[in-house]
Amino acid sequence: DTAVSQTPKYLVTQMGNDKSIKCEQNLGHDTMYWYKQDSKKFLKIMFSYNNKELIINETVPNRFSPKSPDKAHLNLHINSLELGDSAVYFCASSQEGLASSYNEQFFGPGTRLTVL
Amino acid sequence: AQKVTQAQTEISVVEKEDVTLDCVYETRDTTYYLFWYKQPPSGELVFLIRRNSFDEQNEISGRYSWNFQKSTSSFNFTITASQVVDSAVYFCALTASGYALNFGKGTSLLVTP
């Protein structure tokens, strides 16, 4: 009964390729997020969607395009992959943002992207 | 702007020692929320605690305890009688908007037998 799932878990690809990472949550949450964790373990918000609407876009190159077909899914598409895109990407979800009494942001297991 | 500082990059302790992980934050918002997450070697992010800015009560959960002090903008985390399974990277995080977490750089804790 995975709460937040991501596919694939590992992704190895060549520079210049286009790839997608899928995220699904079965918690009934209305807010979903993408975070990037770099090689130094630093976690940084990339995007936040609430009810399929983009809330936060944190100075992410436009090669990164999130797509939310419904409230349960937030996919991340990356065009023209670069070496610097190598990282672990975490999807997360919460109900009504983090300020609600539901208090917790649930994270997926992460997708390790390696660009060669 | 918001900022979370975890000054301790790495800490190494021997099992059964107590250890405190420091977290200092900056925000101009009067309402905000603080979090601690654990990332074990397996890589997943595990939620530990959430605190809002109006609740300065300290919290204890088993061997874990948290000390929130608005006067010093700190939200420190103490593990009592540490165990090898506590070895992980611990992140402190802050949000005021409620829609994104601003993480500190993490503290890597190594507990040796």
Image (cartoon, rainbow, N blue to C red):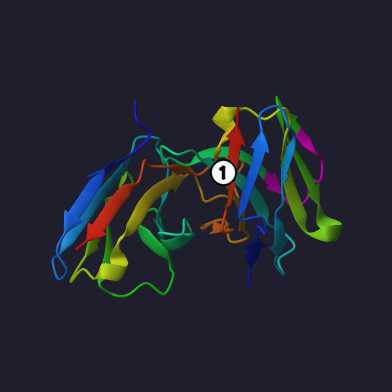
Does residue A105 appear to the left or right of A30 in the view shown? right
At mark 1, the secondary structure is: strand
Three-letter amino acid code at the position of disc 1: Tyr
B33 to B60, vertically: above or below: below
A116 to B76, vertically: above or below: below
Does residue A19 appear to the left or right of B27 in the view shown? left
For disc 1, the neighbor class at 10 Å (few under 14, some 14 to 19, many from 20) is many
Q: Nearer the viewer, residue A83 or A80?
A: A83
Q: Which secondary structure is most common in the magenta stretch?
A: loop
Examine the rendering and report whether any part of residue A75 can be seen: no
Q: Chain letter of disc 1? A: B
Q: Nearer the viewer, residue B9 or B57?
A: B9
Q: Mark 1 highlights which residue?
A: B37
How far across and how far down the image is residue A74, in percent?
30, 52
Name the image quarter holding the C terminus of chain A: bottom left
* Count of marks overlaid on the render: 1
How far across and how far down the image is residue B83, in percent?
62, 27
How far across and how far down the image is residue A19, in percent?
17, 59
Determine the residue positioned at 75% across, 62% down: B30
Q: Is residue B28 magenta?
A: no
Q: Which residues are magenta?
A: B51-59
